Image (cartoon, grey):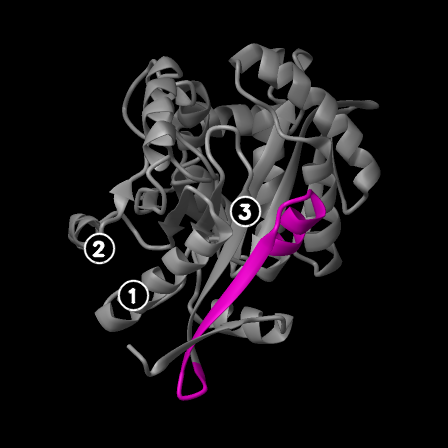
Amino acid sequence: MSSFVTKIISDKKLWESFLLSKKPGTFLQSWNWGEVNKKIGYKVTRFGFFKNGNLLGCALLIHQPAKRGSHYLIPGGPIVDYKNKRLVKYVFKEIREFAAKEKVWFVRIRPDIKEDIKIRNYFRSLNLNPAPMHVHGENTLVLDIQKDDDELLALMRKTTRYLIRKSLSEGYRVEISKNVEGISRLYAMQKETVKRHGFVGFKKKLFEEELRIFGSDGQALLFECKKKDKVLASAIVILYAEKAFYHFSASSQESLKTNASYFLQWQIIKKAKQLGMKYYDFWGIASKENPKHRFWGVTLFKRGFGGERIDWLHAHDIPVRSYYWITYFFETLRRGIRHL
């Protein structure tokens, strides 16, 4: 293991070049996601793992000063070759030692690899523990948009296809921009959505910084679906590694009686195709077939557009201090209460 070396990476070009060469399934280890988290107040550390001067892996660590237990989050990572067991052991050792110096309770990882019982068992052998909670878009639907419009429509649920076509004659229009001013409207609608579905909303500053930072590199757009001058639905879409991600979204109470959400989705898909994206990631869906799951309604809506279900490897924790088990039992209880 002594042949491996860990360095802090401060070169955006080096980081992005390596990451994109691995064809990541998410933007959660991207340089810009780190910048977004720094802007909203989190400490960010970027590790590169080298051998003989060659970059073999990377990990974006985001400090989470949560009341339930201070920890580091590595969403969509670490990015390493998980077949290289010597490297993986080294990476986890380095992360654990860093976390111990930082005096956090644990490190939560969610590698950018598909669910695999062999990897789960391997992680157990390295003393990692399956996390009580999921991490960012762990279960999703991905639609191959490298087809013409008629083919895409033909693969959709009959009702979805009908409502999209119906929406085209109902006077909606979609405005696309990088204008941060539109975030106020998205945030206001999120408040309505939170009341309807009973979840904890995101901060306005997160929306603003995501659109500003990713948008400055041509990697984010704000879509607003309007009828006359009223915004009915809005979404921030991330464009990264040949994928368009339906990341943050919200709709008004009024939109529930309309087909605005179907119109918006269809326009996003068409724009993503125009921009050269190959896939459309609908982001989060329910983790299991359970009508009581709080994401069940939105899951049925997204399924109507077609696409392949992708279950990324479930999040795992690297316990650092014994206090970790306080977090573990608290989150396990909360997951049951929230039907997650």
Instruction: Give residue 126's mark.
Output: 2
Neighbour class for label 1 at 10 Å: few (<14), some, many (≥20)?
some
Amino acid type, mark 1: Val
Tell me the residue at 68%/54% (across/down): 214
Amino acid type, mark 2: Leu
Q: In this picture, is 283 found above or below 339?
A: below
Magenta residue check for 190: no
Quarter of the image with the C terminus is top left
Mark 2, secondary structure of its residue: loop
The residue indicated by pointer 1 is 88
Q: Of 106 and 74, which appears nearest the observer?
A: 106
Q: Position of residue 81 (x, y in %)?
A: 31, 68
Instruction: Give residue 63's mark.
Output: 3
Magenta residue check for 53: yes
Q: Check if mark 3's residue and mark 1's residue have beta carbons within 8 Å.
A: no
Magenta stretch: give its range. Answer: 33-54
Residue 340 visible (yes or no): no
Q: Earlier in the sequence, mark 3 or mark 1?
A: 3
Q: In this picture, is 56 found above or below 172?
A: below
Q: Position of residue 251 (x, y in %)?
A: 64, 22
Nearer the camera: disc 1 or disc 2:
2
